[in-house]
Image (cartoon, grey):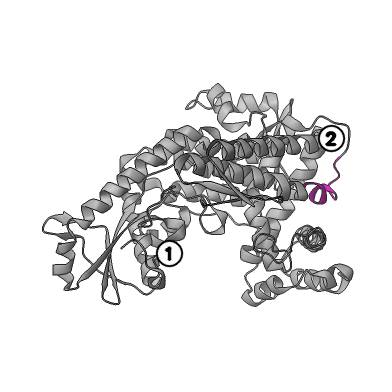
Amino acid sequence: MRTISGDEARALIESQLAAHGHGVFTVLAQYRRDDAVAAWHETIRAVEEFINLPRFGIADVRLRAWLCAIRLDGAFVSNPGPTWLAVRQALAPHLEPSVIARFTRIMLYAGAMGVAFAAHGQDARSASITLDTIGGAVDYFQSRRRHFVSLLYTMPHACSGSLVLQPYDALTVLLPQVEHSCIAIAGFHLKLALLEALPDFSLEVDGIGAMASHDFETLDDYFLEPERASIHVMAELRGDQFEMPAMEPVDGRKIFSTAELRNGVKLIGATYEAFGLKDSAFSAMGMLVVAFARYSRDDYYVQIEKDKFRSMLRAQNELNPAELETLLVNIPSDYATNTNAYQPFLDLGDRVVSNVNLLSRFLYAFKNVHLGSRRRFQIHAGFIFEDMVKRDLERMGFTVTNIKRINRKEFDVVATHDGVIFNIQCKNNWIDLSKIEAERKLFVRYNRSLTNYYSRALKKERGREHLLKQELTMDKVVHYVVSRFPVIGADAAVINYNQIERLRPAGRVGE
């Protein structure tokens, strides 16, 4: 074991990025493009259903709990028949046969892959590979869904061989690649950002791998990307401020459908209408998404001939058709670039291909960009974030006060616990996390400006803590900044929202 830093650490990271990027390309290059895209697309559908079915696909809470507790260990793999049959029988009253078939297929694959990983020294019950139960496998696949989609985006660029990737082989062929290279690529890009942002960053290197001195978690719970005011938070904290639109019926025996996509378009528009979202540009994009869904197959896949697709873009008058095509169709590129891709369509020459989830994901991301620069939304999202922090503090046992202003001095969130005042500033400054891979130097520069700003804000608060002591008749005050979007920094008093649990009284820091 040895410690490296600076240029030596950079050289190691860059060499690993090149090696893993080449590894992904080499594996994909063996396969014929169209077959690989079709096989992996089908696999992604099955995996997405596997993730969503135990959480949202069935209403029976006891059935969901039973399902998630089912073991997928060696005993199951050696004799899967009884469990397989029991699951099919339990789900039959609730879901259509094709959904059940895909779910049980992924269940079998998960068990087999967990045993295979363990045989190669990767524990299926470890913190990163949790394939020993259905519930654990759901978490496992959810943590890797971004990599699955990124591989799909990469296939038109990389697949140029003659081998046929069969649907029943796709997961066993590509999941090891996800574990070996795809996760590593994302991790090494984060390490490069840490190296450039933190002067004391180092790597502990041995014959197996490299352990970083610092880490950086970019995602929220359930591996979701942070955003100023998510649709779920809007429903929870501002549900009385918008009117639910009339929804069309959805087939409860399916997990995904075009009807659900159309309802999603309505719901996004209604939820954020107060901030001016339903203007002509967003309305045009929403109408296009609904129009694309008319070309669905099996209520999931969307395939449109290129000429027809372009005529649909020309038929609307709000957005430039050429610019619109750039927004909607992924430009074939390498894996690292595709980890941040949001275009819903893959370019397969004479046609473009998508699915209802990719279309929904794109429209939701378009909503975030469309609203992001609007002052009214920024202001209200800041208040919403303060309410999120208050909610979380109350859940952790704090008493949240009503203090907003003392002697014309404003405060964001003031809470108390065990005779201590917690003065918390809530910062909702947006950070484009895609820049970590795409424009790292820009990300690091903006990150530095934010951390400096947060340090100045903390200094200012410490200079007026006497106001809080007088108001609450307590002697001790601790000050924090909670950042909605994660930043890289060394100040323990700056807490990223995805780590707000650090505020629990048993682990106080940042006094």
Mark 1: amino acid: Arg
Measuring from the top left, give residue 480's x and y in whole percent. Answer: 32, 58
**Helix, strand or loop status at disc 2:** loop
Q: Quadrant of residue 309?
A: top right
In the displayed image of the protein, which residue is found farthest to the front? 2
Residue highlighted by disc 2: 30
Residue 340 seen anywhere in this rendered image of the structure: no
Please name whichever residue, 362 or 486, is drawn nearer the observer in this view of the structure: 486
Name the kind of residue labelled 2 in the image: Gln
What crowding class fits label 2: few (fewer than 14 Cα within 10 Å), some (14-19), or many (20 or more)?
some
In the rendered image, the vertical position of residue 9 relative to residue 511, given as above or below: above
Residue 194 % position (x, y): 50, 44
Do tag 2 and tag 1 residues touch (Cβ < 8 Å)?
Answer: no
Q: Residue at x 81, y 63 (%)?
A: 115
In the picture of the structure, the residue carrying the numbered disc 1 is: 502
In the rendered image, the residue lying farthest to the left is 407
The image position of residue 236, as x and y in percent, is 42, 62
- Residue at 28% across / 68% down in the picture? 415
Of pointers 2 and 1, the one earlier in the residue sequence: 2
Quarter of the image that includes the C terminus: bottom left
Q: Residue at x 12, y 55 (%)?
A: 408
Alpha carbon of mark 2 to alpha carbon of mark 1: how far?
Answer: 47 Å
Viewed as shown, does residue 316 lie left or right of 17?
A: left
| Residue 220 vertical position relative to residue 125 in the rendered view, above or below | above
In the visual, does 366 lie left or right of 44?
left
What segment carries the magenta color? 165-174
Q: Is residue 167 magenta?
A: yes
Q: Quadrant of residue 477?
A: bottom left
Q: Quadrant of residue 417?
A: bottom left
How crowded pointer 1 is (Cα within 10 Å; few <14, some 14-19, many 20+) is rated as some
